[in-house]
Image (cartoon, helix red, strand yellow):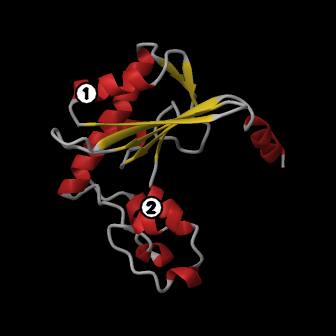
Amino acid sequence: MANSISNKSNISQNGSVLGIDVGYSLTSHTTCFCLLSWDQNSINIDCRNTTADTASREQTLGDMVPNDTLISSVAIDGPLAHDLQIVNHYRAAEALLTLGVFRRRGKPGQTNSPVGLQLHDHATRLAQLVLSKLKEGCFSLSDSAHYEPIHEKCIVEAFPNQFLAALINDREFAGLVLNRDASDRY
């Protein structure tokens, strides 16, 4: 109960979260940064696309996050491992999301597949980019406060499609046929 009251009181305070959709094309703008900021009067959403070029990513992130911003959390839509290690095995999280009711609601990329390894590599690079900007003093990032964090700073792995799918009642989901438009349909 105390957490609920505390969370409700935090809604009216200023805040920011950063979401990153991982892309790895060097020519197309497939990586997206989205900064969601709010205060008592307004909500601001700033989304910017870039390529996988390191300098382009650094520039985009630097341009969009004002100095002295406190970011509560960074959510990266790509596979991450503890302490931002690069791994090449099928992760327990992927196995859990392919069993039971979850198996028909979304399909996580396998970290041990060629595409999954590339996605994991770029997700990790993006997390490290955030940490390098943090170290340069460009912004602040809250410490992790959850069980078994990926990093001591609040960097989390996001899986928006699976989250949206979990919100759908089993009966409603039974007749739903999904293709690449799953998140739009959810």
- Numbered mark located on residue 56 in the image: 1
Q: Element at badge 2? A: helix
Of residues 126 and 113, the one nearer the viewer is 126
Instruction: Please determine whether, in this image, residue 19 is positioned above or below residue 101.
Output: above
Q: Residues within 10 Å of mark 2 (few under 14, many from 20)?
A: some
Residue 2 visible (yes or no): yes
Residue 131 visible (yes or no): no
> Viewed as shown, does residue 60 lie left or right of 146?
left
> Viewed as shown, does residue 120 lie left or right of 8?
left
Of residues 4 and 35, the one nearer the viewer is 35
Q: Residue at x 47, y 86 (%)?
A: 175
- Numbered mark located on residue 82 in the image: none
Q: Quadrant of residue 170?
A: bottom right
Instruction: Please tell me whether mark 1 or mark 2 is closer to you in this view.
Output: 1
Q: Residues within 10 Å of mark 1 (few under 14, many from 20)?
A: some
The percent coordinates of residue 100 (x first, y second) are 48, 77
Q: Element at badge 1? A: helix
Q: Quadrant of residue 15?
A: top right
The percent coordinates of residue 24 (x first, y second) are 22, 43
Instruction: Please determine whether, in this image, residue 77 is positioned above or below residue 178.
Output: above
Q: Which residue is mark 2?
A: 161
The percent coordinates of residue 57 (x first, y second) are 29, 29
Under mark 2, the amino acid is Asn
Instruction: Please determine whether, in this image, residue 10 is positioned above or below residue 81.
Output: above
Under mark 1, the amino acid is Ser
Work out how far the residue at label 1 is from the one at label 2, CA to CA, in angstroms.
27 Å
Of residues 101 and 96, the one nearer the viewer is 101
Please give the count of numbered marks on the rendered protein: 2
Q: Residue at x 78, y 44 (%)?
A: 3
Q: Residue at x 30, y 34 (%)?
A: 125
Which mark sits nearer the N-terminus, 1 or 2?
Answer: 1
